Image (cartoon, coloured by chain):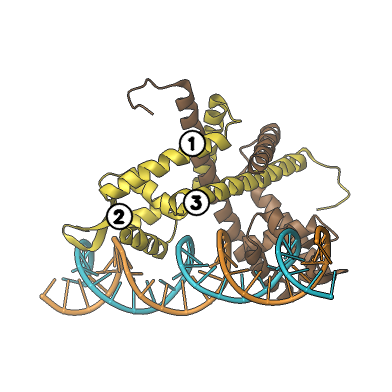
Chain colours: A brown, B yellow, C cyan, D orange
DNA sequence: CCCACTTATTTCAAACCTAAAATATTTTTG
DNA sequence: CAAAAATATTTTAGGTTTGAAATAAGTGGG
């Protein structure tokens, strides 16, 4: 706590991690902004909509609303609005869950699957261009570290 | 375009980059969510407010509104509202700019500086805990790569 | 059965965010 | 110098996002 103490090894590690986070955040926001822009121009859609469809495309049985908000790490109320609009557009359906009238199973419609396939292909190529500086090995390595980070963050919370 | 072609080396690199981006985004959202939560509970504040104060703390002369929105990469109108509330709370002041009655210089008050110092210290320690798995060298290395990524993204846009 | 508790979802208020229009001021130019 | 252009900011309209409260439905102990 004393400002007169010599800088400890831990201090510089802490600074390096803070710096990492700031870079991380800035990069993530830049990439996100670019994707948002592309989605809007090429598909008249938004990132939250894409995220919902992407999550559902990985679960062919669909997901309940609360599972969706868990997977996407956004609030329940937020998912309600996004799903509402995707249902209006005919990309999603809400299916009643047998024996539980509180819950809905949300699924991609056939039309939704087709639409998402087109968006996902474009999305992959945007990312491939933007992250071109990362070679395959580097990309894989960093992805694994981030997965570990994610796991440890989740454990810490419980 | 043929689905019968053998998988090219480029394809797997593209997949690896996509995977990297998805991990990246998820990690970034988890960390952000945690920080938001901490700011709310410990300082009754939000991430946008923290960002504004952080930007101003790096410029002791203060920043003009347009400089703030440039630095934070958010819209002008957005900054107006956040600054309004921080001024109400006594953390910021708008100072008239000599010879230009259109512009304001926004600065931390003494109280704002104190408040931000406390928040920044807490923030650094949250990050230090959350990113504890990254050693100092790794953190520094990845930060540099992200800085390069950021630069190349900005160049691409122009 | 019934009361309390939990779970699933929606609604709500407030803050955030953007792009575009409006306002006020300064600078440039014919 | 006056009109036009540029600059700095705020206002406005329309969404997005969050946390918390409200609603609705299931579960379980007594």
Mark 2 vs mark 3, foreground winner is: 3
Disc number at residue B92? 2
- For the point 36% across and 63% down, the residue is B80
Do the residues marked 2 and 1 share a common chain? Answer: yes
Toward the viewer: C3 or A17? C3
Q: In which chain is the residue bearing label 1?
A: B
Mark 2 vs mark 1, foreground winner is: 1
- Marks 2 and 3 close (CB-CB < 8 Å): no
Circle 3: is it few (<14), some (14-19), or many (20+) Cα within 10 Å? few
Whether residue B147 appears in this view of the structure is no
Toward the viewer: C13 or A73? C13
Toward the viewer: D5 or A55? A55
Q: Residue B10 location in percent, x, y?
A: 74, 40
Residue B15 in which image quadrant: top right
Q: Earlier in the sequence, mark 3 or mark 1?
A: 3
- For the point 43% across and 61% down, the residue is B75
A102 sits to left or right of B155: right
Taking A101 as reference, is A49 above or below it?
above
> What is the spatial separation of the Cα atoms under label 3 and label 1, in whole angstroms?
15 Å
- Marks 2 and 1 close (CB-CB < 8 Å): no
Residue at mark 1 = B125
Do the residues marked 3 and 1 share a common chain? Answer: yes
Toward the viewer: D3 or A61? A61
Q: Residue A88 location in percent, x, y?
A: 71, 76
Residue B79 in which image quadrant: bottom left
Q: In which chain is the residue bearing label 2?
A: B
Circle 3: element type: helix
């Amino acid at each position: 706590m004393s400002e007169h103490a010599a800088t400890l090894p831990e201090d510089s590690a802490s600074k390096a991690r803070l710096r990492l986070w700031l870079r991380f955040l800035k990069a993530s926001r830049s990439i996100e902004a670019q994707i948002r822009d592309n989605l809007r121009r090429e598909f008249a859609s938004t990132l939250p909509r894409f995220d919902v469809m992407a999550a559902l495309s990985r679960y062919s049985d669909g997901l309940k609303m609360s599972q969706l908000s868990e997977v996407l790490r956004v609030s329940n109320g937020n998912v309600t609005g996004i799903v509402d609009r995707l249902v209006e557009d005919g990309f999603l359906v809400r299916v009643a869950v047998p024996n539980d009238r509180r819950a809905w199973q949300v699924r991609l419609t056939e039309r939704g699957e087709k639409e998402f396939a087109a968006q996902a292909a474009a999305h992959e190529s945007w990312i491939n261009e933007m992250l071109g500086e990362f070679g395959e090995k580097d990309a894989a390595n960093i992805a694994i570290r981030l997965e570990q980070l994610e796991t440890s963050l989740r454990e810490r919370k419980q």
